[in-house]
Image (spheres, rainbow, N blue to C red):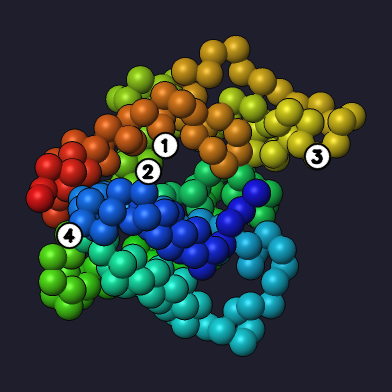
Amino acid sequence: MLINLRTQLNNFKKVEKLLRSKLGETQGKRVISRAVYLFHIGVNDYQYPFSSNSSVFQSNPQEIYVDFVVGNTTAVIKEVYKIGGRKFGFLNMGAYDCAPASLIIDQTKIGSCFKPVTELFNLHNEKLRNGLRRLEHELSGFKYALHDYHTSLSERMNNPSKYGFKEGKKACCGTGPLRGINTCGGRMGVSQSYELCENVTDYLFFDPFHLTEKAHQQIAELIWSGSTNVTEPYNLKALFELH
């Protein structure tokens, strides 16, 4: 089940009110201000127009569409800031345009990245980075960690053995070329067969679009304590230590 960003914001506002009522005004504010708010958003927004044969780009050029996605995120960040949030964590758009699932969209180029989505991801990452830098100047006390997920995921796709994987572009579970069709667990019907790898820890991707637990662990460590060349200007550990 997907919960849209505005609904998540409304849910957060309810939690904030509950904290104030349970802990008192002073302690409630302290919890809100010392918390770190983690955002990872956009993959579904950019994949959907292609996977659904949507006509969204006929009336909205790609740059305007990216501005809409990043603008919605920025608006929610400002709302959380108004409530008292000061520390935020972000991942930019990972290289999912090169994931096994991209084969569903374009099976004429097996194993290649889906370039229309690549363009959107690159534009998103540029606008997100610039937007966060503007917020840092506009909002007093605003601090953030931005993980370069695009680079860290691409590195593991292209150099799997360097990170302890045997396969960086083929999914552990699925069907078709590189197991890029999402039939894992009978997803596309009970009678639909699917392939499953023997050792999941050898794989970067578990299914055509989601990483394995081992891969997530590696990415999480980079977000938590990675150096400034992968997570900047702070990592999450440093954000939690800020008062």
The crowd level at tag 4 (other Cα within 10 Å; few <14, some 14-19, many 20+) is many
* Residue plotted at (43% across, 49% down): 95
Q: Amino acid at mark 4?
A: Lys
Please report contact status of discs 4 and 1: CB closer than 8 Å, yes or no.
no
The secondary element bearing badge 3 is classed as loop
**Camera-side mark, 2 or 3:** 3
**Camera-side mark, 4 or 1:** 4
Viewer-nearest residue: 93 or 72: 72
The secondary element bearing badge 1 is classed as helix
Q: Is residue 43 left or right of residue 107?
A: left
Please report contact status of discs 2 and 1: CB closer than 8 Å, yes or no.
yes
| Residue occupied by mark 2 | 154
Q: Earlier in the sequence, mark 1 or mark 3?
A: 1
Q: Earlier in the sequence, mark 4 or mark 1?
A: 4
Q: Does residue 150 appear in the picture of this structure?
A: no
**Camera-side mark, 1 or 3:** 3
Please report contact status of discs 3 and 4: CB closer than 8 Å, yes or no.
no
| Residue occupied by mark 4 | 143
> Image height check: is 175 above or below 143?
above
Q: Position of residue 153 (x, y in %)?
A: 38, 41
| Residue occupied by mark 3 | 188
Q: Does residue 19 appear in the picture of this structure?
A: yes
Q: Is residue 13 left or right of residue 31?
A: right
Please report contact status of discs 2 and 3: CB closer than 8 Å, yes or no.
no
The secondary element bearing badge 2 is classed as helix
| Residue occupied by mark 1 | 157
Q: Position of residue 19 (x, y in %)?
A: 36, 52
Cα distance in 3D space between marks 4 and 1: 31 Å
Q: Amino acid at mark 1?
A: Met
Q: Earlier in the sequence, mark 2 or mark 4?
A: 4
The crowd level at tag 1 (other Cα within 10 Å; few <14, some 14-19, many 20+) is many
